[in-house]
Image: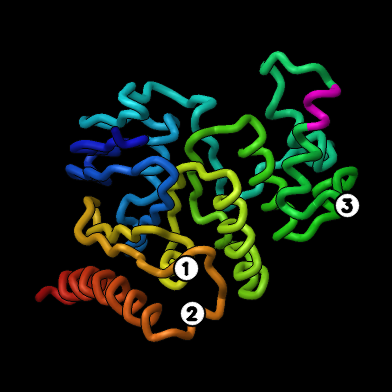
């Protein structure tokens, strides 16, 4: 059984149809990226899987059970860091563990463990305004992983970072995923990023969105950035980019009335 099974998903916002029959599955411990033109419904689809929005029709199953709201089986990381500015990095992670039946000492130990995993053990007592953008996003990832979700949902988490920091975060994410071995659904507009981190890249159509093309990423793991310069990477990048380009050209044709 797939960890996540999405079937016939539609979503309308008034007269605007965001999704129309989107179907996909994510296997256990699989890393899958969603890419496509702006406004194609990538983030809407992820939000429905997270339980933050209800679909108009269709269903999302996690381990065979329907999603009917947010759950501790799914961790979510957004582009915005959503950290509490008055709490330290450790306290932000600990906050996610409230209600888990842990003692204060247990919460502190888990938070310290996760911050160490993302390379922030030396900044546990720092507040968000003392951290760089990349460091804030590391705290957000540590917080999402702290309660041991089986599925991690990420909506353009590195979109606000500079190019070098973004590359370092991609490398960090693949290392964290390899250690945790959890299922990841990753939304991005960056084709190179999608190919680098994923087992599969799914390209969506223009709005209303559905899955139009699947690109299996056969690059070996663990990944290293030297792979980006290889012919194999270039071929995968080109295949994904061409599929998105077809959708962009379709938008341009409509725009000029062809």
Q: Would you name the residue on which mark 1 appears?
A: 196
Is residue 34 rendered to the left or right of residue 255? right
Q: Would you name the residue on which mark 2 appears?
A: 228
Horizontal and vertical percent position of residue 40? 30, 55
Q: Secondary structure at mark 2?
A: helix
Quarter placement of the C terminus: bottom left
Task: Residue at 64% x, 71% y: name it.
Answer: 162
Helix, strand or loop: magenta stretch: helix
Is residue 111 rendered to the left or right of residue 190? right
As displayed, is residue 224 above or below residue 46? below
Query: Are the residues flagged by discs 1 and 2 in contact, CB closer than 8 Å?
Result: yes
Measure how far apart labels 1 and 3 are at the Cα level: 28 Å
Is residue 85 rendered to the left or right of residue 186? right
**Does residue 231 belong to the magenta stretch?**
no
Query: Are the residues flagged by discs 1 and 3 in contact, CB closer than 8 Å?
Result: no
As displayed, is residue 100 above or below residue 7? above
């Amino acid at each position: 059984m797939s960890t996540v099974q999405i079937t016939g998903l539609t979503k309308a916002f008034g007269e605007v149809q965001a999704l129309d029959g989107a179907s996909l599955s994510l296997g256990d411990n699989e890393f899958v990226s969603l890419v496509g033109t702006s406004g194609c419904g990538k983030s809407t689809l992820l939000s429905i899987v997270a339980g933050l929005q209800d679909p108009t029709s269709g269903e999302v199953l996690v381990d065979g059970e329907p999603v009917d709201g947010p759950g501790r089986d799914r961790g979510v990381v957004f582009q915005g860091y959503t950290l509490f500015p008055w709490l330290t990095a450790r306290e932000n992670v600990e906050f996610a563990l409230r209600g888990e039946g842990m003692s204060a000492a247990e919460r502190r130990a888990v938070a310290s463990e996760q911050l160490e995993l993302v390379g922030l053990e030396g900044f546990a007592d720092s507040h968000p305004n003392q951290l760089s953008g990349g460091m804030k996003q590391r705290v957000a990832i540590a917080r999402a992983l702290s309660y041991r979700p089986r599925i991690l949902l990420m909506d353009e988490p590195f979109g606000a970072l500079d190019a070098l920091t973004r590359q370092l975060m991609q490398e960090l994410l693949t290392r964290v995923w390899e250690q945790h071995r959890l299922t990841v659904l990753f939304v991005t507009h960056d084709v190179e990023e999608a190919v680098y981190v994923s087992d599969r890249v799914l390209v969506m159509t223009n709005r209303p969105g559905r899955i139009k093309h699947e690109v299996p990423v056969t690059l070996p793991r663990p990944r290293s950035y030297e792979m980006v310069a290889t012919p194999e990477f270039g071929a995968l990048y080109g295949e994904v980019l061409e599929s998105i380009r077809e959708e962009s050209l379709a938008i341009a044709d409509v725009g000029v009335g062809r």
